[in-house]
Image (cartoon, helix red, strand yellow):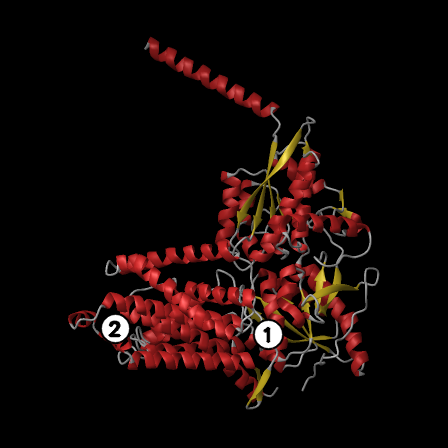
Amino acid sequence: MDNLGVFLQIIFWGLYAGCIYILLATGLNLIFGVMKIVNFAHGEFLMVGAYITATIFFLTGINPYLIILLSMLVLIGIGAVVERFCFRPILGTGKLNEIFLSIGLIYIFQNGAAMVWGDSWQSVKSPYDGITVPVGSLFVPLDYILIMIFTAAILCGLYLFLKKTTIGMQMRATSQNRKGAMLVGINVERIDVISFGLGCALAAAAGTLWIVSGQVFNPYMGSIPAIKAFTIIILGGLGSIPGAIIGGLLMGLAENGAAFLLGGIWKDAISFVILIIVLVVRPTGLFGEKGE
Amino acid sequence: MKYSVLFIAIILIAVALIAGCTQQQTASAAPAIIKVGVIASLTGPASNVGTSMWQSAQVAADKINADGGVTLKDGSKAQLKLIVGDDESTQQGGQTAATKLITDDKVDILVGGYSSAVTSAYEQTIAEYKVPYIVTGASSPIITHRTDIDTSYIFHHCTTTDTYGQYTTTFIDQVLRSAINKKFNFTADRPLRLALIYQDTAFGKGVQSAVNDTITKNKLNIQLVAQQSFKMGESDFRTQLTAIKAVNPDAVYLAAFPNEGAPLITQARRDIGLNTIFFNVENNDNAQFYKDVGQYGEGSIIESRFSPYTAPAGAVADAQNVFKQSYFAKFGTYPDALGASTYEGVFIAAKAIGNTGTTDKASVRQALVDLKMPQIIEAMKDQTISFSPDFRESTFDLWMEQLSYNATLGETRPAIVWPDNLKATDFILPSWYVAGSSS
């Protein structure tokens, strides 16, 4: 493998990692944009989504790429319940309550998942395992191409939903001015439920794509990705979906570049180095002022 | 004044009587229960191996108790009571678990400990309370070699990274080299290109250090062409593997936990196209590893002393089989190498307490120092379990296994290929194997 080949391969792995981060961070930003709540338990929705997909796959053998939609629907339901019974009662009572509530949710979801599914590592074998396709000078597994296609499709779907549907427009209005939205008759509590559910569904998509790529998973898998998702939304700009997309891609590329150039132990640290630099140079994040 | 004096006198007499009674009780009463604390990673990245260790300890305690328990100095029998402490695969969790077992549960002896980084974090507590601790999973030699704290109550009953790092490197030099040279018609003086990818912890760095030292001290013609690291619990290794593939190694040595080793090999062969031989540390000789790695494990090598799926012919084969069957009957799966040493650790604890006839911690420590007991389920040096006088380490007989894929099972299975006196089959280079090159 020549130097260019290695470089392109690293870029490719960075794009793949970026896809997972984008979905997770976009969901988190959607929730923050509309409700302005800090949910540290967002990574647990990724974990639950992964387990739902894996469980259905183990029981039925259905192609996991097809299960992704079902997993997202289930997470919309779970998200709606969590929003209604956990976050809504404390909405507006202070960030500290939201933080402690979400930390509590982390333990509840992790221990609940360990009770239901056990806490051993598990893995899922994609039906396309072992199939490679040529991409330029590289031969890459088909699964990674599918993961990128699915990510792009989900983001396009989200874009159309937010731009073209009445609920999407109401979500954007609530995000821009919650009181104004209430004054024009938008049921913001309904929008909160939908936003939270959609955010969780995106996390479920990230979880599903995580496991079909062959990565092992257990009930504690969501903690680190959640921290990274927070880093990404601060990097991209709080509440900005384009910021989450660009931030996710940057994070994926930076992590893999750092692992290659500086060593694996810098993989996680580089996220925070970039975050500090961006906050010092541009405290609102890359898209903090212009974003949606 | 008269009543005050009388009151004080009564209090003093009462205190003296109570103290006397308590002292008499301590002197005469033999413990009917011996509390054995088991520190294991039941949650977190190391939970797979930790669960095997805890469950193996239970099988051992069941066996000892069913056989009547431990005979004490006065001839009475005591039953073992296991109390588990979950270190949560973290240093803080390990500290909490050890402190609770020692101060709240007041255990008589400790067994277990996985992840050298986690175990070394709470060794200070062991030193402070002077509780005998038989470490059966943490493999870095620092566990008993460190000098910043008193480790005299800590005994090491598992292979150290120094030992298996040296053993594996010797196999690479003697067996892999000749197989590659023979198959590809290379000259005998061609340097073997070895890549190393290791967990960035005391465990991984211990393996890295052992490999480097073995090459240097023995002047082996092995060139370390890459040394990549990763964080404990990592699941995406593609970038480091891409860097390794770029330098065209003849083989890759992994210092990883099973939950890291299986995706490492899978990603290397499936995603990167790194068609080489992977060397694994003994903790990967684990049922879940075989399940996770699937067909991508074909051709890989595991250094081992106990396997869920094979055993060397000889004295320990039957004993291993009995243990595996007991374990399977209770838990529906098979134990791993670290489970085996933890199983033995409970027997060693019982033997030491039985030999000294008391649970007095200093006496039990001395009994462990003096211990010489026949090997149990693992093949030991001189067929005897004993601890070295310098660093209190036991010595195991090791072997190397090569994995082959069983399509019916959908998993690989091991066969011993080295040393010659234990091997069931010869080491082979798979047909898909690609030798390394400097260009």
Mark 2 — on which chain does it sit? A
Q: In which quarter of the image is residue B405?
A: bottom right
How many tags in the picture?
2
The answer to whether residue A35 is visible is no
Q: In this view, does B425 lie to the left or right of A63?
A: right
Q: CA separation, marks 1 and 2?
A: 41 Å
Q: Residues within 10 Å of mark 2 (few under 14, many from 20)?
A: many
Q: Quadrant of the N terminus of chain B?
A: top left
User: Percent from the top left, x then y, of residue B24?
Assistant: 57, 21
Mark 1 — on which chain does it sit? B
- Residue at the outermost top position: B2
The answer to whether residue B280 is visible is yes
Say which amino acid is labelled 1.
Gln
User: What label does residue B267 carry, if any?
Assistant: 1
User: Percent from the top left, x then y, of residue B327?
Assistant: 67, 49
Which residue is tagged 2? A175
User: Percent from the top left, x then y, of residue A238?
Assistant: 31, 73
Q: What element carries label 2?
A: helix
Say which amino acid is labelled 2.
Ser
Q: In this view, does B3 lie to the left or right of B153?
A: left
Observer-nearest residue: B438 or A81? A81
Q: What element carries label 1?
A: helix
Q: In which quarter of the image is the C terminus of chain B?
A: bottom right
Q: In which quarter of the image is residue A167?
A: bottom left
* A97 shown above or below B277: above
